[in-house]
Amino acid sequence: MATFFSRGFGGRRRVAEEYADRLPPGQYVETGFPVLTAGVTPRIGDDDDWALTVDGMVAEPRSWTAGQFRALPFEAIHTDLHCVTKWSKFDTTFRGVSLDVLLDEVEPLGAFAMAHSHGGYTTNLPVEDLVDGRAWIVTEFEGEPLPRAHGGPVRLLVPHLYLWKSAKWVAGLRIMDHDEPGFWEANGYHNRGDPWREERYWND
Amino acid sequence: MERLTTFAPRAPGRWQIGTVSAIRRETPRVKTFRIELPMWMPHLPGQHYDVRLTALDGYTAQRSYSVASSPLDEGGVELTIDRLDEGEVSTYFHDVVVEGDQVEVRGPFASYFVWRGESPALLVGGGSGVVPLMAMLRHKRRTTPGSTMRLVYSVRTVEDVIYADELDGDALLTYTREAPDGWTGHTGRIDADLVATTGISSGTAFVCGSNAFVEAATELLVDVGFDAGAIRTERFGPTG
C-alpha cells in the first residue's frame, strides 16, 4: 500500500456511498461521455451499409449484413463503463447482440480473438472474455443509434474490461489459436485490461 | 545539434516520488511543473505520465498529463497542467503545490501519439492540446533542426497562449476569439489557408485538443490531402 501522502490533499471529491463499490481503483466518476480515438473518425457509410464478420479458426466463418444482424436477438445492456484514462461512467444502456449468439454460430476452435475495425484499429481478447453474457455487438446507446464518435453504427462492448477493448466501428472478429497484441496493447497498454485489477499498462 | 536519444521500450515506470523543482506560470490558468525523478528514463515526445494523489485517509486520485519537455532534458519531466475548476488533481497542483513539494508519478506511457523523427510533420493543437506537441517541437529543434515540422496552434485570446515566448518561425498562431492589438496573422478557426501557409500538405500529422477541435481539424486535414491513416490524434474533455 502507498505510504506516500500528498501534502495538503484532502480528497475533495468523494464517491457517493451507493456507487463506492462500483468504482474501480484509480477511477473517477464522469457524467459526460468523453470521446477517445487514436486517429480520424472513420466514415462507414450509411447506417445500414455495414457487415460483421467472424472468421479465422472457427468451424464455420460467418458474415452478417446489417439487415441480417438486425434479425438476431437483441437485448438491453445496463452497465458501467471504465476507461483507462481514469474516468468511469455509471448506468449506461446499450442494445445489441450477445457474442454468445454469434460465436455459437461459428464455433470457435481457438482461444483468442482479435477484434478489427474500420480504420485499422485492433484489440485482442481471450475468447473466454467474450462469452457467458459479458460481451456484445451494440448498435444503440440510450435508445438512439450509436453516435459515430462512440463507434457507430456498430461497436464491440466488453464492459468488464477497460473501454479500449470495446472496439469502435468494429468490422469483425478473427478467432486465433494464439494471442498477439492489438493496437493499444502494442503501444504500452496492458494485454488484458481488467479495471478492478488496474491492468492499465504493460507491467501492471 | 545534440545527439538523438536512444529509446529502449522498457517496461513503463513504477510509481516513484518526484520533487517539484520549478513552477512556471504559462497563462492565468496554466502552469508548468518541473519534476525531478529518482528513476528518470527517456520518454518519446508525446508520451504521458500518470500522477497519483493520496490523502491521509487513503483516498487517491489519478490523472494523466502529457510531458512537455524534450527527453534531452534529463533527470526530470515537465508537466503543463490546465486548471480545471471542477478538477481535483489540477486544482491541487495549481492551488497547493509549491517548489520543493514531493509528488507521486509514473511513466512514460503510450507509444502511439509520439514523434519518432517523421518529417514532414504537421502539429495541430487547440488550447492545452499544445502540450504534447511542444515536446515534439522542442525535441525536433534540439535534435534535427533541419527537418520539417510546423506547429499550428489555435487559442482563444492572447491570455491563453501557452509557451508564448517559444513560438517562433516554426509555429503559427490563430486567435479564435480575440486577437491582440496589431495582430496581422491568422484569426478564426484553423482553415485550409492556414494549413497551406505551413507548406506541409502531406506527411504525418499530430492533432491534439478537445474532441470537437480534433474532429474539425482532422476533417480539414483529410480535405486538404492528408492520408487519414497518417493522422494521429489525442483528445480530451467530456462530451455528450
Image: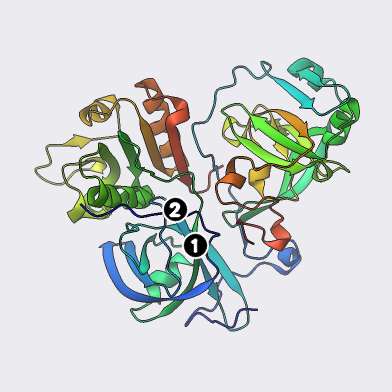
Residue at x 62%, y 82% (from the top left corner): B57
Q: In what element is the residue under mark 1?
A: strand
Upstream in sequence: badge 2 or badge 1: 2
Q: State the image coordinates of residue B212 (x, y, percent, origin top left).
A: 45, 38
Q: In what element is the residue under mark 2?
A: loop
Quadrant containing the N terminus of chain A is: bottom right
Q: Is A66 in front, or is B188?
A: A66
Report whether B69 appears left or right of A41.
left
Residue at x 39%, y 58% (from the top left corner): B67
Q: Residues within 10 Å of mark 1 (few under 14, many from 20)?
A: many
Which quadrant of the structure image shows residue A49?
Answer: top right
- Residue that protrudes farthest toward the left in the picture: B182
> What residue is disc 1 on?
B107
Q: Find residue B53 and name its label.
A: none
Chain bearing tag 2 is: B
Quadrant containing the C terminus of chain A is: bottom right
Residue at x 30%, y 42% (from the top left corner): B154
Residue at x 42%, y 24% (from the top left corner): B227
User: Would you say the residues marked 2 and 1 are in contact, meaning their CB atoms lie under 8 Å apart?
Assistant: yes
Q: Is A193 in front, or is A109?
A: A109
Type of the residue with mark 2: Gln
* Residue B195 in sight from this viewpoint: yes
> What residue is disc 2 on?
B47
Report whether B15 appears left or right of A18.
left
Chain bearing tag 1 is: B
Report whether B146 appears left or right of A21.
left
Q: State the image coordinates of residue A182 (x, y, percent, origin top left).
A: 63, 40
- Work out whether A6 lies above or below A51: below
Type of the residue with mark 1: Gly
- Work out whether B227 lies above or below B12: above
